[in-house]
Amino acid sequence: MKTVISTRQILLPILLLLIGTGYGYASYQERVYLQTDKQFYIAGELLWLKLYTTNTEGELSSFSKVGYIELLNDSIPEIQVRLDLTDGTGNGWMELPVTLPTGYYRLIAYTRYMQNEGEDIFFEKKISVVNPYQPQETRIQPGTENHSFKLPNRVTPNHIITVSADKASYQARNKGVIRIQELPSDSISLSVSVAGTDPIQTTTPSIQEWKESLFSKDPISFSTKIIPEYEGPIYEGQLIDRSNNQPATEYGIVGLLSFPGENIQIFNGKTDKNGHITFYTGLTHGKKEMATVVLNTSEKSYRIDLQSPFAQHRSKTYQPIYLDSTWHQYLLQRSMGVQVMQVYTGDSINRIESAPPHTFSKPYKSYILDEYTRFPFIEEILTEFIPIARVSKKDGKRTFSVLTEKMDKFSTQTLVLFDNIPITDQEQIYSYNPLLLKKIDVYLGHYIFGGQRFDGILSFSTYKGDYQGIKLDPATQLFNKGCTQATRYFYTPVYEEEKVKTLGKPDFRHTLLWIPTLQSNGQKEMTIPFYTSDLPGEYTITVEGVGKNGTIVNATHTIIVTN
């Protein structure tokens, strides 16, 4: 017998006991630190991220499995991402819109569990963005002020490491080597960036200042109304009465949350007395869409509206950026570089890992329809080729059913999926064009979602997994938000041979290197190669890291790139 049961039902009572709460007051506290490849960006650029989650001692913590990062203009989110966290760290990216106005922005990071304590304990840093495609205000005239391109001084970390390069100066498209020395003996999760040193420098908390702030306040107990995401993303929603579009308070309505695509991935929930429903999910890495379906046995018609998983933020404004007119050439060069890189290397820059397959039980039988004679109607396909499934009638409507596990009769409760979206009104599928279907999978056995049992699953899949041409039931809602972010590959060309340096596409990379997943594993010294681009100027090598035992490291080094 196959049964779908979330491990949350087993682990939740244990977890609540460990953090000292029964939906009451807790003593365990979680904190985060956020790194970026730099602090000054051009609209349209990629902003690279690494997030650490720790306890209040600064030790890496695997408590939460999802991190939240938002780019805010005052209190309004411009970009929101959720990151998968493994062993206390996660990494991701933000693609800054080309329409983003010039200004200072708030980059906020937190976990769901941290929302119990309020916004004061969220991590925040200030990011500068310039949009060269929009009119700018200038502050001074050329030649009236001398600008230094040096980074602000940083507080010495609690373990001093040294960072150096094999040369002080490089030509364009040269190979360089970074050497990190005097690393501590414990394992450190490191990030390494090499980015152009910019004229606009904003003051943000250093990693040392962040850790010192962890000890600046006495621990307090707080109410844990918001459950931590210790398995994976949690999605919450409200039952809505479709007759009046008002929140409904009916208890025990079963809802399903699924992720459209080829692989079956379904999670269940039941409404509480307020009509609120919670879905506890697992792996949602890289998923782009979600669907909610109400399995409603009453005469009323409902839907489920998902709520935003992100926190609400209070207002906080910054003074505007006044650009120095002496930066005109530099900003022009940067903006041209962003555009050229998209035109000539867009495929490499925009390389994103597809979502990993989710493991579900293998189908009893999979029918690849291109291997059979194509019929113009779905009902004919089942009748001619799929003897373990049939068409039945229930309450005057046609329904699909499959054989029970004992193979002695047909099920009266079969779950029907279309590109992994549960279909409650199965009449929709009978009129579907079967030429758009790739395969039909049949699953035998018992499957339980939210207390409702299905004796088998009949799954229809299109070629692209995008539910093309199907008319979904009004009880089905589609959402394009909230899933954890897919992996994006950092693009860096390799210039090993002389002939390669003079051929190929323009290289206007401003961030030469971004490695957020480096592990020291007790090594005292590490070497990392990188390659310069066609952009001359000063570049800053930055190394930051947090260890399992709370050790932090931070060091910078500057190099010059010439034409």
Image: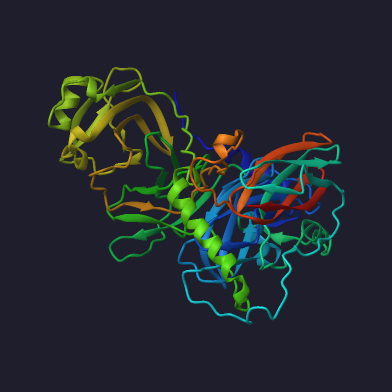
Residue 228 visible in rendering: no
Q: Position of residue 122 (x, y in %)?
A: 67, 62
Q: Is residue 116 above or below residue 401?
A: below
Count of numbered circles in the view:
0
Q: Residue at x 57, y 67 (%)?
A: 329
**Residue 137 position by quadrant:** bottom right
- Quadrant in the picture for the N terminus: top left
In this view, the residue in front, 393 or 459, is 459
Does 363 sit left or right of 436 as displayed?
right
x, y percent for residue 87:
69, 40
Q: Answer yes or no: is residue 61 visible.
A: yes
Seen in the image, is 398 located left or right of residue 460?
left
In x, y percent, where is residue 225?
62, 58
Q: Position of residue 418 (x, y in %)?
A: 30, 38
- Judged left or right of residue 41, residue 303 is left
Q: Nearer the viewer, residue 541 or 169?
A: 169
Closer-to-camera residue (179/275): 179
Residue 92 to residue 524: above or below? below
Residue 309 lies left or right of residue 214; in this view the side is: left
Which residue does the image show at 84% across and 36% down from the upper left?
A: 524
- Rendered residue at 16%/30% (across/down): 379
